[in-house]
Image (cartoon, rainbow, N blue to C red):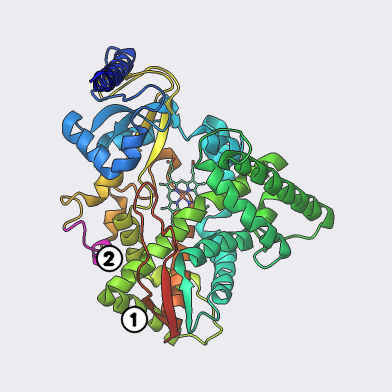
Amino acid sequence: MAVFMMVLGLFFLVICSCTALLRWNEVRYRKKGLPRGTMGWPIFGETTEFLRQGPNFMKNRRGRYGSFFKSHILGCPTIVSMDPELNRYILMNEAKGLVPGYPQSMLDILGKCNIAAVHGSTHKHMRGALLALISPTMIRDQLLPKIDDFMRTHLNSWDNRVIDIHQKTKEMALLSSLKQIAGLESSSMAQQFMPEFFKLVLGTLSLPINLPGTNYRRGLQARKNLVGMLRQLIQERRASKESHHDMLGGLIKIDDNKYKLTDDEIIDQIITIMYSGYETVSTTSMMAIKYLHDHPKVLEELRKEHLEIRGRKRLEDPIEWNDLKSLRFTRAVIVEASRLATIVNGVLRKTTEDMELNGFVIPKGWRIYVYTREINYDPFLYPDPLVFNPWRWLDKSLESQSYFFIFGGGTRMCPGKELGIAEISTFLHYFVTRYRWEEVGGDKLMRFPRVEAPNGLHVRVSSC
Ligand code: HEM
């Protein structure tokens, strides 16, 4: 009996302490003018619920508090905005103090000149330097030939093999950008680069705890190693005096370079290019392959488009700019795969001062999660939203609608959109014109917080 009473007492003590802690945390954040919502536990906030419940966490909160509410997730007091109009306003108004609010681990590892870490005139300068490298003219004249050359080789010898598409698209995205940056895709440097880059990516997604064995510590070390390799490469380039027609060549060209960068800025710019295009391009490519496999009619239409192009060419002829522009259905497949899989759930901003937003006063330093995922499944915007229907994108005006956030919006709208689409289109070109494939089966796909196949997505490939 005494033991029972003790357990009961302990139970009540735990319940009371938990309630008191939750209550205290709510009161702590009860400032005048904040939107509705709950803040969860001290320090941890509602992160566990958010990660466990996934998209339902946001949907439940929206049901309770409307599409603009407060929470405490991923270590910060956060305002979640799910309203398309408000989202656009937030993304358009960086100058009013709504700057990128990415986690500290990401900023530390990607570098202080990384585009997400800079604002105002420095952002303009870094973005200008980047746009000069990946403009439509550059894609046409310099990048597309490199991408074509890379994809042909990357997709060689897949016949009669079981291929892990998840792995292959990751390698594809990284090696293709290494080729565009400095022609490194098949060098020994690429082999040293790859594992370090993968550690860097993991580090950016970790808690910023700098202890031995943590992903954060490994990420910082990987950054150090990558910076060392890139610095050496830049020095070699400068010493050789040879001109190179690649991204690094464009960045270190001194004459007539309006967007001249220091070596540290060049290094962070290169890491930015690799990082931003890596997971987005690889995951979209993997999901396109997945949806094409599951929708034979779509695959048939896509293959027709690519065979028409191949029919006009010799085997060794590359995909050119005009071919790329004619791939309307392929573009639609890529955008539809991005929509249905939701490759990017949203983007993060933070306030640089107390500011009024949507009739509320948001304190300085709070994070704003511009959460765009649910827009992708809005039946009023995309009829039958859970159906993979690339035909809906043949009306190209859909891409310029104010609720289209697949590539972000406002002043930080993705500058690599067309480059990414060019890479995925070329990858699909060589895949569907050379091969047929069947899923081996049994692979798990995770949809949240990131789209990934934790044990790979295996397909059995055979020649067409
Ligand atoms: C095709 C897949 C891609 C998707 C879905 C995608 C998506 C996005 C999104 C949603 C943003 C907005 C981030 C924000 O507002 O904070 C963004 C920004 C950015 N993207 Fe992409 N992206 C893709 C490909 C690429 C590629 C291939 C590059 C390579 C150059 C790239 C470079 C960037 C950069 C540098 C930014 C930051 C721009 C700035 O802060 O001014 N992206 N991307």
Left or right: where does residue 403 sit relative to residue 196?
A: left
- On screen, residue 435 above or below 197: below
Question: Which residue corresponds to mark 1?
Answer: 304
Secondary structure of the residue carrying numbered label 2: helix
Q: Number of numbered discs present?
A: 2
Identify the residue at image location x=23%, y=62%: 392
Of 280 and 119, the residue lying toward us: 280
The residue segment tinted magenta is: 384-394
Q: Residue furthest front?
A: 1
Of 86 and 110, the residue lying toward us: 110
- The image shows residue 172 at horizontal and vertical percentages of 53, 65
Residue type of the residue flagged with mark 2: Pro
- On screen, residue 5 above or below 323: above
Figure quadrant of residue 327: bottom left
Question: Which residue corresponds to mark 2?
Answer: 390
- On screen, residue 124 above or below 301: above
Secondary structure of the residue carrying numbered label 1: helix
